[in-house]
Image: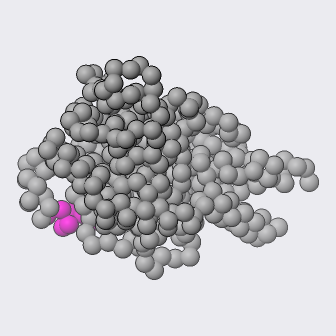
Amino acid sequence: MSLVSAKKRLLCVAESVTLAQVVRLVSLARGLPRESYEVHFACSVFPELVFGGTHFTQHRLESMAPELAAEALQAGRRLYEKSTLLRYIEAEMALIDAVRPDLVVGDFRLSLPTSAELCGVPSAVLINAYWSPFARRGRFPVPDHPIIRWLGESLTEQYFPQAIPRVFQHFASPVNAARKKYGLKPVGSLLEVLTHADHTLYPDDPSLTPVDHAPGTHRFLGPVPWQPELPDTESTLPTALSGSSEPLELQDSDRPLVYVTLGSSGSVQLLPMIVGVLGQLPVLGLVATAGRAELRDVPRNVMVRAFVRGEDVARRARAVISNGGSTTGYQALSQGTPVLGVPSNFDQYLATEAIVQAGAGTCVKARQATPDALRAALLRTLEDAHIRAAAQRVAASFGAYDAAARFRAFVDQTVGAERRATG
């Protein structure tokens, strides 16, 4: 048998609606040694910031544009219709047939488990545990939705739990309709659709996002760290209010550092308000825009960058302001740094809720954000010793996980079992 054919062949497919779906799958696949694994990666774009230094074979697949996804979420519309999913399935089946992988792994690619099933290839899905049908929860938070403008906050909160079953069925119905066309059984409602595959992988810590009575095919990998490789100068701040043009290393400042990023899917229109609040406080601010905004009239105690090494900055920061999602939230908590979440979409609310329930952060809903609300929440995040202690407890728990090693063990076990079964 040749060296190439002896390698385990993995096909990763990410729906590129946010950077998070791509980077965490890339981060896991990076941990697979080249001499043992042949990794194929499919998505719509391959930014050097994320894929630099990888040895993956790249395949371009259609994906929903991030701006269209954000527009649909803000309007409360489902992202996919049956026609789109059928187009996805045809393209995925052709790719699977060409690559002939031992295993396919998807991140928010709702069509992929169906394509893999039709091709007779085992599949895994990467999805946060707070989306699991087995997640331990009370009630779902209310995301930002146009209906709030009509009903108001109180009535929406009152009737939202009653609407959830219908909403989830509505969002899941295109997937089930596509499966029906191919003669496959329906999967269920939205939570079942999001977690449906032969294997379900949670990039989370069960102490933060617990699940109860999940089947053995569900497993926790632990949080998946990622930060871009950037020059050392990206981790500096200007000397505050001194008139000097010389940079000041973050760790040399006697002012608390606040790191701000709303990522690729947060309410970026709130950045000027957040920067304005930072300008009124005795802090140093470092804002990463992800290239989504150009900020004007920036206070002298705030530096703006497109991207930074978030984990390194979070380690030095006293607080992190984010969109509340798991990517930056977990990045901050891994360093024991409290989080102020400003969520808008459903995923961000679920992640923020888990962080707040752990006592490791605070929340200002994007739809309720005002300078006064943000200032009060930030001061509490900076000054409350209980919040900082909780963030440090979460960091200690996170430290017990090596997501890349767990992913490699999972692939080894799954592919090995599959190869033994097929002879």
Does the magenta segment cover residue 160?
yes
From the top left corner, tell me how far across and down residue 51 is, in percent: 61, 37
From the top left corner, tell me how far across and down residue 188 is, in percent: 40, 66
From the top left corner, tell me how far across and down residue 81 is, in percent: 37, 46
Furthest toward the bottom, the residue is: 213
Q: State which quadrant residue 6 falls in.
A: bottom right
From the top left corner, tell me how far across and down residue 83 is, in percent: 42, 44
**Magenta stretch, residue numbers:** 159-167
Residue 235 left/right relative to 294: right
The image shows residue 39, relative to residue 119, as above or below, that is above
Q: State which quadrant residue 189 falls in.
A: bottom left
Q: Residue 205 or 75: which is nearer the viewer?
A: 205
Residue 40 left/right relative to 109: right
Q: Which quadrant of the figure contains the N terminus?
A: bottom right
Count of numbered badges drawn on the protein: 0
**What residue lies at 29% left-to-right and 52% top-to-bottom?**
382
**What residue lies at 20% left-to-right and 45% top-to-bottom?**
375
The image shows residue 13, relative to residue 220, as above or below, that is above
Does the magenta segment cover residue 152?
no
Q: Residue 254 or 382: which is nearer the viewer?
A: 254
Tell me if I can see residue 53 in this picture.
yes
Q: Which quadrant of the figure contains the C terminus?
A: bottom right
**What residue lies at 56% left-to-right and 72% top-to-bottom?**
217
Q: Residue 368 or 40: which is nearer the viewer?
A: 368
**What residue lies at 56% left-to-right and 32% top-to-bottom?**
232
Instruction: Decide whether the magenta segment is chiefly helix, strand or loop.
Output: helix
